[in-house]
Image (cartoon, coloured by chain):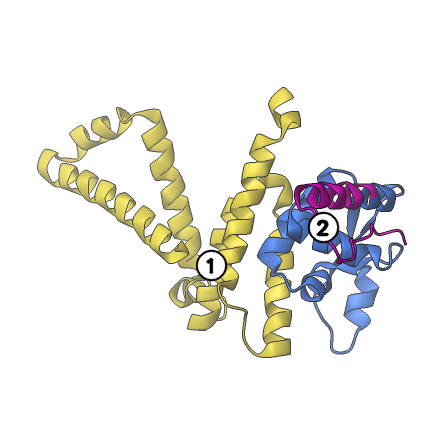
Chain colours: A yellow, B blue
Amino acid sequence: MVTALAAAVLFVSAALLLALALLIAVRGRKSTAQAIKQLPEPLDAFLGRVGRRLVSLWRTSPEGGQHEGQPAATPEEARVGVRLRFIGAFLPDGEKWRLEETMNHRNELRKQRGRLPRFYYLVSFAGACRMRWEAWADPKRQVD
Amino acid sequence: MTKQTELVLRELLRNPTRAQYGLAIGQAVELQSGTIQPILARLERAGILESFWEDPDEHVASTPPRPRRRYYRFTTDGAEQARVALALALARTSRSRPVKPGTVAPTPVTD
């Protein structure tokens, strides 16, 4: 499900970026820059966030690591990194440290059993979403 | 209170003064990290539990060295709150499910 959601977000972003690229090709740079400036603010912010997320995901990939002069991550490490970052993105701001705990639990479980329980990442993702929801629905936050 | 929260509280009440780390709690009640974390966060917000990272000397000195652990323990009156909450949950359950004749009714946690 996490992969499907990520794929859907990437697909929508790619479609938007493709539309922009076509606009650049057809109308030229100057008019495209004007068009980008006229984008609604929420859409502009969304594209900015997607761009930053893509860059951070790319940095966890083996190619990204090499580019930054760091030792290249194995494909398995890169996959785990992407999943954990995705889960971390959904944790509420005050609870980001729980990502470290999730990662440590994952590593300990791998060491003890050799494999993770079924749907480990999916359950962690659901837990992160639940924490975010509870933090958002907290009456104290709404009063503040 | 959910069944999972009850399980976590019962596990912690086995030894209310001892701090336990998340993975150990999860393994004791057979729940995954993703289920345990929101429960622990909720109990912390309710003031029943408090958490802290272990002393760096402990995890660095352990053989083999391991990542630091986050420990959870009851606050000063957290254990009492937990017992009351469990007793209330038990009372609610027994009210909604009448005990069949000839069976033994469950008793609240008192330790």
User: Please, is residue A140 above or below residue A107 in the view?
Assistant: above
Residue A129 in view of the camera:
yes
Instruction: Name the residue located 9 percent from the left edge and 37 percent from the top edge.
Output: A26
B109 lies above or below A74: above
At numbered mark 2, what does the secondary structure look like: helix, strand or loop?
A: loop
Q: Is residue A76 left or right of residue A100?
A: left
Please name the residue that numbered disc 2 is placed on.
B99
Residue B49 in the image: state x and y as whole percent: 78, 46
At label 1, counting other C-alpha atoms closer than 10 Å, the crowd grade (few under 14, some 14-19, many 20 or more) is many
Say the numbered circle drawn on residue A83: 1
Q: B88 left or right of A72?
A: right
Q: Residue at x 45, y 71 (%)?
A: A76
Q: Which mark is residue B103?
A: none
State the image quarter where residue A63 is shown. bottom left
* Structural distance between the alpha carbons of marks 2 and 1: 47 Å
Give coordinates of residue A86: x percent, y percent. 47, 52
Q: Is residue B102 magenta?
A: yes
Of the 4 image quadrants, the one containing the N terminus of chain A is: bottom left
Q: Secondary structure at mark 1?
A: helix
The residue drawn where x is 66% and y is 48% is B39
Q: Which residues are magenta?
A: B84-111
Residue A122 spot, x, y in % from top left: 48, 57
Q: Nearer the viewer, residue A49 or B29?
A: B29
Picture layout, residue A23 above or below residue B22: above
